[in-house]
Amino acid sequence: MKHIHFANYSPAADIVVAAICFVIIILVVFSYISKTRSSKFFLTMVGLILGAAWTDMCFYTLAAHGHHLVLANWMRCIFHGFLFLIFVYYIAYICEVTQYEKQDFYVMIANIIFAVLLIADFAVTARENTFIIDESGIRFIGRGIFFFGYIAFSVLSILLMARVRKLLYHRVMFGFYGTMAISYLVLLMQGISGQSSFTVSTFLFPVIAMMYFMHSNPYDARIGANDIKTMQDYVSYCANKKLEFIFMSLYMREFAEGGKQLPQEMQTLIRDFTYRLTRHGRLFNAGKGHIILIFLKKHYPDYETTIETALNEFQTLYEKYRYDYKIVIGESVEEISRKNEYANYIRNIHRSMPECSVHRVVPEDVVSFNRSEYILRELADINRRRDLDDPRVLVYCQPVLNVQTGNYDTAEALMRLSLDQTGIIFPDQFIPLAEEASYIHTLTEIILHKTCNHIRQFIESGYELWRISVNVSVPELKEDNFCPDIISIINKSGIPGDKIAIELTESQNEGDFILMKKKIGELKEKGIKFYLDDFGTGYSNMERIMELPFDIIKFDRSLLLASGAALRSRRMVANLASMFSDMDYRVLYEGVEKDSDETMCRDMSASYLQGFKYSRPQPIIHLTEYLSRRTV
């Protein structure tokens, strides 16, 4: 029989489909795809589409040459089997990614439909040819089986997508809807035009959507890092396979808070090091300014040499750029791997690390992390309940000596937590957690509410008390209801606004400065006083301080120590304090611990003194031991 050319089919479409499948496979090999059950379904579908494209081309090739028509007949049956099996995996995939509660039912229906169609197709193929070749070309006889099978699977797919529409993010769902619609449209146009070239390609469109929406893990092309979700998938894979690994974490605060990009030379070092020394390692972006390198221990038995090489090369670069850093190095921990919490585990270590330091993980770090996680859960519950009388939040107080009157007529309210599993917790252990999780404003509301109530009780009992200050975190100022919440709590307590002071630390961020100026102005109209806390530490801009209407400047203990250590420092601090006093600010010295400290502060324009010399922080009810009663 002579060679036949089929006007309704061209192998070009199947060749393109096969090429795209190979491209997907290459991308999977040279990138990173999460090793989950759904990813296995996805890769199986790619393989099935490749098989369908190959059998479709084989069928038309055998039929066109007129040889082995029986084999061509069975090739057509296998082609249908590939397409039907793609449908089955598509149903299973959607059920898996949505974790649909009735997934077993839908997968069972899909398998039943597949089995019935395959048996019917094989029966027809075994009994007779499903196509004939005549002078006009090729004509299919048993075409109804595939047609009805396609309709049956399409109805099941559409029904399933409608059922799970609330279990997927709406944009992802619409993406799947769109690709399915295009597939049906192409198939319809193919049927109208009498074509059969694009059947396999219509099965490829939804798979491309799957790859883009569900399995794409784009690299940061500059350093070759994946995102945090990819890291979690990789850790889960290692945990399931019982694979031990080494992690090296680099955190650079300047790039985390300032939004700056890593210098090109540093990006090159990180990229080249990862490839050169840990060719099997994986690099991940754990957040702004934070990258984590993970490599399997079995591939690097002498991993300490690799680590030392990395540290030496990084130190050379540090000498050039002088960016602050924190490096954490450790081995995988079964408990942390099981929780899949390495990013948070490392961040918890960061909190206690000084800048420009390297920390080797020790077992105590896990204990500290578990403690922090417990505290964070309690903070989340406190925030959720928003009970202003929550017994877990305690108000401690430290009296402040008024140098002019010699009385303790002001104080600072300090927060403590009292939790079942840990007992009393100090602020440095929970304030950073509350700030990071955006729970801090709720804590401020609680301590302000309780402080106001105590102030009212003290006044009603006849004690002389000018005010109590409450610490406020700068990020809180970004809360839309910050000022209304503060004013509402004070008003409900029935005390005058000037009985409360708010302590703020200075921020170098321009946006924070503008916001702080606005909020201070709004609250000062209600009589609330403002303290600049921790003056002399970190960042201090005199021009900005002059623009903010503070009432009291709190000199940090570090200035007191410096004044006691060197005459030059003492003169500088004394001149600063004198300048503030001349401008109608009051100066409060923190950290006064002995008589010599007090004498020095009095000589340096002190208006108020606070420190362990007078009292350690204690429950606010004990403040009455320091307050004077009004005389009648």
Image: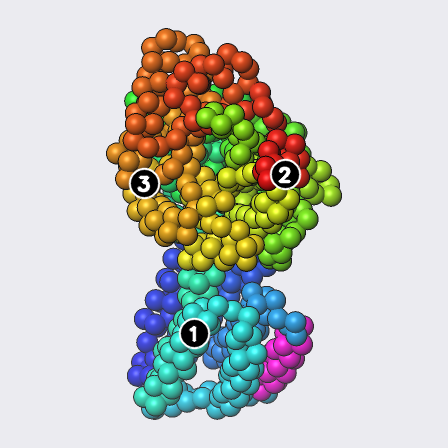
Residue 506 position within the rendered picture, expressed as x and y whole percent measured from the top left: 37, 36
Task: Answer with mark 1 or mark 2, whichever residue precedes in sequence.
Answer: 1
Residues packed near mark 2 inside 10 Å, few (<14), some (14 to 19) or many (20 plus) = many
Q: Which residue is mark 3?
A: 548
Residue reaching furthest to the front: 632
- What number is the disc on residue 620? 2
Task: Identify the image quadrant of residue 621.
Answer: top right
Q: Is residue 609 above or below residue 458?
A: above
Circle 2 SS class: helix
Residues packed near mark 3 inside 10 Å, few (<14), some (14 to 19) or many (20 plus) = some
Residue 297 position within the rendered picture, expressed as x and y whole percent measured from the top left: 57, 32
- What number is the disc on residue 174? 1
Residues packed near mark 1 inside 10 Å, few (<14), some (14 to 19) or many (20 plus) = few
Tell me how far mark 1 sits from mark 2, CA to CA: 58 Å
The answer to whether residue 445 of the structure is visible from this angle is no
What residue appears at the point 61 percent right and 54 percent down from the top-left corner?
388
Task: Identify the image quadrant of residue 408.
Answer: top right
